[in-house]
Image (cartoon, coloured by chain):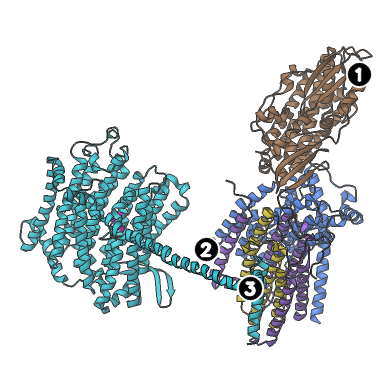
Chain colours: A blue, B yellow, C cyan, D brown, E purple
Amino acid sequence: MGIAVEAVIALVKIAVVLGVVSLVVAYLTYLERKIIAHIQQRLGPMRVGWHGLLQPIADGAKLFLKEDIIPDKADKVVFVIAPIMVLVPAFVVYSVLPFSSTFYITQVNIGIFFILAVSSLGVFGIVMAGWASNSKYSLLGALRSAAQMLSYEIFLGFSIIGPLMLAGSLNMQKIVEAQSDVWFVFYQPLAFVVFFIAALAETNRVPFDLPEAETELVAGFHTEYSGMKFAFFFLAEYASIMVVSTVAVTLFFGGWQGIGWIPLPGFVWYVLKLGAMIFVFIWIRATLPRYRYDQLMRLGWKFMFPLVMANIFLTGLVKFLFL
Amino acid sequence: MVPLTHYLALGAILFLIGAAGVLMRRNAIMILLSIELMLNSVNITFVGFARQWADLTGQVFAIFVIAVAACEAAVGLAILISLNRDRQMMNVDEINLLKW
Amino acid sequence: MIRYAWLIPLFPLAGVLINGLLGSRVRDKAGHVASLMAGLSLLVVLGIAREMILGPGGSHVVPVWTWITAGSLSVSVSFLVDPLSTIMLLVVAGVGFVIHVYSIGYMHGDPGYPRFFTYLNLFMLSMLLLVMADNYLLMFVGWEGVGLCSYLLIGFWYEKQSASDAGKKAFIVNRIGDAGFLLGLFLIWTLTGSLSYAEVFKAAPQLAAPAATAIGLLLFIGAMGKSAQIPLYVWLPDAMEGPTPVSALIHAATMVTAGVYMVARTSPVYVQGPGALEVIALVGALTAIFSASIGLVQNDIKRVMAYSTVSQLGFMFMAMGVGAFASGIFHLMTHAFFKGLLFLGAGSVIHALHHAPAAQQQDMRYMGGLRSKMPVTYWCLVAAALALAGVPPFAGFWSKDEILAGAFFSGHYVVWGLGTAAALMTAFYVFRMIFMTFHGEMRVDHHAREHIRESPAVMTVPLVILAVLSVVGGVLPGFPPDAGWIHKFLAPSLAKAPGHAALDEGVRVVKAAAQAGAQGGGHGTAGIALIVLAIAVALGGIALAWRMYLRDTAAPARLERRFPGLYRLLLNKYYVDEIYQACIVEPIYRLMRALFDFDQKVVDGAVNGSSFLTVWFSRISGIFDLRTVDGAVNGTAGVIGFFSQLFKFIQSGMVQNYLFVMLLGVFLMVSAYLFR
Amino acid sequence: MFEVESSTRVERSSVVPGTEELIINMGPQHPSTHGVLRVILRLDGETVKDCDCDIGFLHRGTEKIGENITYTMFIPYTDRLDYIAAPSSNLAWVTAVEKLFGWEIPMRAHYIRTLVAEFSRISSHLLWLATHALDIGAMTVFLWCFREREMVLDLFEHAFGARLTVNAFRLGGLFQDVPQKFLDLSQEFADLFPGRIGDYETLLTDNRIWLQRTRGVGVISADDAIDLSLTGPILRGSGVRWDIRRAQPYAAYPYLDFVVPVGENGDVYDRYLVRIEEMRQSTRIIQQCLAQLPKGPVSCKVPRTIKPPAGEVYHSIENPKGEFGFYIVSDGSETPYRVRIRPPSFVNLGGLKKLALGGLVADVVAIIGSIDIVLGECDR
Amino acid sequence: MELAFFYLFAAGIVGASLLMVTRANVIHAALLLVLAFLFMAGLFVLAGAEFLAGVQILIYAGGIMVLYLFSIMLMNVGVAVRLRQWHRQSVLALAAAVLLGAEVWAVLGRGGYPGAKAWGWGLGQTPGNVEALGEVLYTKFLFPFEVASILLLAAMIGAIVLAKREITR
């Protein structure tokens, strides 16, 4: 009996999170368009609803109603599965994110590890999409993406080791609790910088948006996609932004922990910090040009990799000597 | 609790599927993939044993197996790429240099 | 401080890593890095020595980690600090450091500069391991390490054919000795069940005399190779092909004395087998006089030194052989000072002459009159020469004549006689070298003359340091009371040889006599006689050299004409290399050729013969076959063909076929398990 | 029994292509080829091994049209050559024809022509900067540039009633004088614009990523540039101080003070700097034109039927992209006997192969951007 | 419950693997193998090897298999699909494999494994599997661990040398 009740509760939670997240992700696109528009001194979407507030819904409806084109020479099965393969891992990750001290779907011992593992699967969707499209631009985009995500996953993984060493746990809740005094960003500024850069690359954001660099590779791996499948890629991208922002907030900015005496519920703190992180993501997109493929790899392997290694070593040394 | 035999049986089945793949396919990549499957079947038995006797040695060995698998993949694929580049070959049964 | 003994080899190791791995980056700083590392090592050594000398002394083992555990054999990497190793450490680290500094100047501008210092530091590391080891295996590691470095450094200028040949020669000759050494180690382990000094020496008194003698002789074979004793000395003169600092450090001061150190270290075993000691004494004495006599006529400045080194090593082994272990070590120390100095001085001269034609740079016949040009070098070399000749109060007098006294009083009169004769020759040839090089008219090639000037400070300062040590290095530790402080200090590390009482007494008497002589009193007729004889021998040798090479310069040529055979014999080093070539190398070649011929003629002949027979037989039988059993033959061929068709598939060259067979093998194995 | 899919069975797999090369058609419909340029790239991984331009997708036979219509009627056709900087094309044509006639043009007309030509230079460079930055991924610069370009186009509208294909000048001068509002707005723009250039530069000039993407990319030496007869900012980016406004002055340029900026390394970054500086210099020229603008008529006497003397003439001006010239042969009738256009983009595009070989795909995009082509004039 | 999940995962693994070895298109095969690995990760969680499950996904699925896909795309296998897929010895090999399977079945049927022990920890507890594994890995198996790292280094160098086009200097 107990199992059934638990299952039902879990399902409800999943439904809530999934619904909210989908909506939030959809509105993230609106947010990005608005913020970038204002940075570029224009207004952005204004027509649909008050200040264009219904724009994402209109977009969704449009994409949903659009003709779904599958290129003739494409590998049909893989072509259809690819966007799903991108979207699903991006959403699965939400199952272990701690939105507040009480609200989460599940708590896993290997929380952060789980996030890393599952988000590493996203690259499959991209590679599949690029290959299945049977187009050279898509293939090039997919190859770039595979190399890029494979490399930067390493830095992402190594950069979080520092905070994890301080927290002494992989459990997301425990990590947050470990920061009740000082946020880890103050102990681990180096790790945060590397994490942030790797996160940009991992989510294919400017200045690392090579896989979909539209002025070089048309639209990269999703050149041939349209309609809802195209929307999936976009949803996945924004969902990943949310995820890495959440991880950043959890690992470096104390998660749902508040600042000092300000009496706000943990969830609000969480949302505030998340919002700030996401704003930075968007801000960067509006500011920076794009790296070249070889420069990206050089930056990763020759600069960031030694940096994270040094960080881990230093953290270990300090922890060994003084703690 | 799942009996150990189940793990072993599953491992054996996967091993044999993998072995059959290695022996029967011509495409070199397919052979490598089948080898990965065989390695994983071993992992399953390791984990099963670890589960049975509450001994982490099995899991540790599974990690080592994964490390070996990574090496195997890297070197194997490198060989394939150079083979493919230099001789435009993809099928193992066309390569019989060991004969000489 | 003693706890930190492991730091001593660590610094050279760091130097090796820095210079070896980053050589191209370090470049001109390599010498400074290496010298710094050697200096740091020396600092630690000095700290330890201070504690050992001023403190209670004793024997300390500094464990580092367990190296090998195989059955009952357990070898640890741990360091032994006792009086003997302290003396050796002082010599190795001290002279080593000085020579490192000297090399900065000497090797400046050489394309292999970082490589040189890498090797030099590697040598320091190995040598320190050798003297600090607390067991034979670790010592063997160091032993081999120094051999390797010696090879690398002799052949440092590998583009020169003679240098690389000399390196190979040194390495191969050393291997012969090492084989003996290794056998000795096996024997030690078999007989005592351990390789650590402490346990071996504990078990040593229980060893039977023949066993101890066998061990001793085997180990001494190793020492012969490393320390260049008859008959394995041939590599050392050739080793002078290496850079001069190397000759000074490795082939005069430290590495070649490893054999002496090893014998001294193993003295508890040696005293159980007196036969070995007798052999050592005789070999040492023969080596001493033999090579001293070769040194009399050599013209290459470094070769004179080389034969002198061999000769002095002979003296040290003489000391070991007659049981005067402490005296041998004492001489080892003083020899390191003055022979190192001689080499460095020679290097300084060669350095000054590097504008002369290559063949003349080291040839004393093309030198002369350098005294005014290079005063520091000259005076340092004179100090060294006096020390080597054994003129009191220079260092050599105290140690060498102690050895002779030891030989005399322990009853080895033959050995003593040979030694005294060798001492006379020593005094002669070293001053012959001084006179030919620095006195008389200048015979240097004309356009090289203006380039002759005193070496830079980085080279002369080491010379001065060593000169000071050559002056005081003997009198300070060797001066009475008793037989000298060094004897007391070393006593705990060394065993007492049979008849040691007489020997010690004799040495003590001689020392006392010397003291008395200095004070104008009188003690022990024999002692005084010995001292007088020794001084007379030294001065006589010098006087003879002076007469022949300064006063009557035609004398050498005259002598040469009168005894042409002897002169040529000496000049050609008794034709030893040729004899080895004829007696050892040639026979081996001939054996090879004989075996080859045997193979060609007998084996192939047999084969060819049988095939010839077969051909005839088959011709006959062919007729038979064709007529009668054609069908049978064809049938056989068919069968063979069938099987080979079958077996052909086994080697298809296809991986998957092989894998399939593997799977079948697994299948069979499981079957065996299942139906067993 | 296991040999399935045997219908197209091939025993040897030697037909399997290797990993060697990938041939990519960049364009004619590609976001960063700036029109309908088709570049055929042979790639090894991402490295460009070969690069071929396929042009002509926008060919309209402009030269041939010129032989069949009168000299005045041809002016709107020049709008469609370099449509990004239409007044410059107009200027080239009218000055060439006036040289054929040997007419004297009133000073006020010269000044207004110069003013408008410099506006067209700014407009062209703004579009170039916008798209070039976007090619390299900086999207904000794109929109900022368009903001200012909008102002320039508004000015054209005030003066000539059209924004893009303005048909600005007439043979012998202008169709009519410009309104005062145009001059006021021009002054306003000229005061505002230098600050805006500073804005673009804050986003790009010292941006590490921008530097990495442009420095040392697409390098061409001065000698090579001259050999390939490249002109305009590419030539100047390689360090050759060649500007027709200075070398063979026309219109009001002899009376104006401006600097011809040159680069040093001849890479994409230097071309960028050169163009940015040219925009500044253009603003200076505009300021001077507005200050010195003389009073008087804007046109000389022009006969109703324009019949030039028989003969031939070549005249070129410094278009934003380079040397833009017309070679006209007249047989004395109302229509030219032959019109030949010397288009800068076409010639400059010839250097693409030299610039792009050995680079990466992403560099090709940056290089095409830095050549600054417009296909209308390239394909004619 | 646990058994049910085991069967679910086992069925998934076996199904995916069977499909994998029979695909003509290598990309499909690789993707199916990824699927099998994901099921395997679930199986590992079931068996109390959470960390291993993570590693399985992160390294195997997310790393090694991406490498495969990458290489396959580099090699352009489009043509390979149209080639004959099966080796000449297929029938024999299949027979041998099936026979071996039967034997293994017989061996497993004998049973006889010592009794089970319980874990010292449960799912979701601390200190959990990760801590315990880390403890063992860095103490008892430190040496093999380091050896494995050397092995990886060697493989990396080997792979680079093999796949590098030519050494230009």
* Secondary structure of residue under mark 2: helix
**C-alpha distance separating marks 3 and 2:** 95 Å
Q: Could you say where residue A194 lies in the image, as x and y percent from the top left?
A: 64, 54
The mark closer to the camera, 1 or 2, is: 1
* Secondary structure of residue under mark 3: helix
Out of A280 and C516, give the one closest to the viewer.
Answer: C516
**Residue under label 3:** C630
Specify whether residue C253 is painted magenta: yes
Q: Could you say where residue D298 lies in the image, as x and y percent from the top left?
A: 86, 16
Query: 10 Å neighbourhood of mark 3: few (<14), some, or many (≥20)?
Result: few
Residue at (28, 37) in percent of width and height: C453
Out of D177 and C207, give the one closest to the viewer.
Answer: C207
**Residue under label 2:** A322
What amino acid type should be assigned to the residue bearing mark 3?
Asp
Query: Which quadrant of the figure has residue D205?
Result: top right
Work out whether residue D188 can be spotted: no
**C-alpha distance separating marks 3 and 1:** 107 Å
